[in-house]
Image: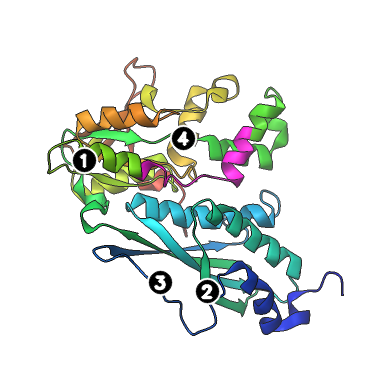
């Protein structure tokens, strides 16, 4: 049978094929055992992705869906200040799905994970009327270097590690190719790649901790990733910390191509609410924030300041756009 369906080879047959994506010395028992370094905290995160909600054949190949699923979980670890140890994969699929589709999904996960020396260490497969992918990622961090949302202080600078809106722009091109008629092939490819193959910012952590080591303690740091949109990240941090924020719209780093394609209002909408850029958002004192932005380069920027207000306000210093109060309800929310 050249291209069998999952129901043709059954659960055990599929598991036998997928075991080659996992280290043989770890899998085979009822649970994975991961050794951690003494003096480190274990960090665990879970993300669930559903076909036609988080991915589809229209916008992502099986490899891209696998990459994005792995990247989302690695990004959550990066947002906590943790380095990855491994992931487990829970997969729900109809029996009519082809075996090659599942193998390509795992290949995409593996391609992303290998960049960060992260193995697939186990999981589960069940029959489901809709394709559902649930990943649990395990990481470790020094207890003093775990990043939390509730640590923002009034006067902190708000830093983003890169541009925002590119993933949403890529999704628009995939759904409506005719909308990018004034973009060249290289520009289209870059935006689509930002959506299909996002890069979790684990590379930021060594730079961040080196900067912190050069300042006398204690230095406060709050943060999370921007997978649900930049506005969501800032609002979530402020809500957890009991503070507000003033964002300067002109300081938000956007893809340069947006200036030739989208209106300023639409560009900001994509950056604030598009989501899935997988950058990190930090709140920290001004001096180390400046140093961090200088060392990161490539679109990193200080975009605002933490305030004593209860609101997160988007301000335009040129006053071309009225001040806006940002909220979670303006972005994507499940069940809304």
Query: Who comes first in sequence, dot 4 or dot 2?
Result: 2
C-alpha gap between disc 2 and disc 3: 11 Å
Q: CA distance from mark 1 to mark 2?
A: 36 Å
Q: Which residue is mark 1?
A: 213
Taking the spot 51% from the left edge, 29% from the top edge, the residue there is 266
**Is residue 263 shown in magenta?**
no
Q: Nearer the viewer, residue 14 or 320?
A: 14
Which mark, residue 34? 3
Q: Which comes sooner in the sequence, label 1 or label 2?
A: 2
Marks 4 and 2 sit apart, C-alpha to C-alpha, by 33 Å
Q: Residue 10 at x, y = what percent?
A: 71, 83
Mark positioned earlier in the residue sequence (1 or 3)? 3
Asked whether, in this view, residue 12 is left or right of residue 243, the answer is right
Q: Secondary structure at mark 1?
A: helix
Q: Position of residue 144 (x, y in %)?
A: 20, 54
Q: Residues within 10 Å of mark 2 (few under 14, many from 20)?
A: many
Q: Residue furthest right?
A: 1
Task: Say whether residue 260 is left or right of residue 84.
Answer: right
* Residue 164 badge: 4
* Coordinates of residue 323 in the picture (x, y in percent): 32, 27
| Precedes in sequence: disc 3 or disc 4 | 3
Between the C-alphas of marks 4 and 1, the distance is: 28 Å
Distance between the alpha carbons at the discs numbered 3 and 4: 35 Å
Q: Which residue is mark 2?
A: 122
Question: What residue is at 50 percent from the left and 65 percent from the top?
Answer: 135
Q: In the displayed image of the protein, which residue is found farthest to the top?
A: 318
Q: Which of pointers 4 and 2 indicates the residue nearer the eye?
A: 2
Can residue 327 be seen at all in this image of the molecule? Answer: no
């Amino acid at each position: 049978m050249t291209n069998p369906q999952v129901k043709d080879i059954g659960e055990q047959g599929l598991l036998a094929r997928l075991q080659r994506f996992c280290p043989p010395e770890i899998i085979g028992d009822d649970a994975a055992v991961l050794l951690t370094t003494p003096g480190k905290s274990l960090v665990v995160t879970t993300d669930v992705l559903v076909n036609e909600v988080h991915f589809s054949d229209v916008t992502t190949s099986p490899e891209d869906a696998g990459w994005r699923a792995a990247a989302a979980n690695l990004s959550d670890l990066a947002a906590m200040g943790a380095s990855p140890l491994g992931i487990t994969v829970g997969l729900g699929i109809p029996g009519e799905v082809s075996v090659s589709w599942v193998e390509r999904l795992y290949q995409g996960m593996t391609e992303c994970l290998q960049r960060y020396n992260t193995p697939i260490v186990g999981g589960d497969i069940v029959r489901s009327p809709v394709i559902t992918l649930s990943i649990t990622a395990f990481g470790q961090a020094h207890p003093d270097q775990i990043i939390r949302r509730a640590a923002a202080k009034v006067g902190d600078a708000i830093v983003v590690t890169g541009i925002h809106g590119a993933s949403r722009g890529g999704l628009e091109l995939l759904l409506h190719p005719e909308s990018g008629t004034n973009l060249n092939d290289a520009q289209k490819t870059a935006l689509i790649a930002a959506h299909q193959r996002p890069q979790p910012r684990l590379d930021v952590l060594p730079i961040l901790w080196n900067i912190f080591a050069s300042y006398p303690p204690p230095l406060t740091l709050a943060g999370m990733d921007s997978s649900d949109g930049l506005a969501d990240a800032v609002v979530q941090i402020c809500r957890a910390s009991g503070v507000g924020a003033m964002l300067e719209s002109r300081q938000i780093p956007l893809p340069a191509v947006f200036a030739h394609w989208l209106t300023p209002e639409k560009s900001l909408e994509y950056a604030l609410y598009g989501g899935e850029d997988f950058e990190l958002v930090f709140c920290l004192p001004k001096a180390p924030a400046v140093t961090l932005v200088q060392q990161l380069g490539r679109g990193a920027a200080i975009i605002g300041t933490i305030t004593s207000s209860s609101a997160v306000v988007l301000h335009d210093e040129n006053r071309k756009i009225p001040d806006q109060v940002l909220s979670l309800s303006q972005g994507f929310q499940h069940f809304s």
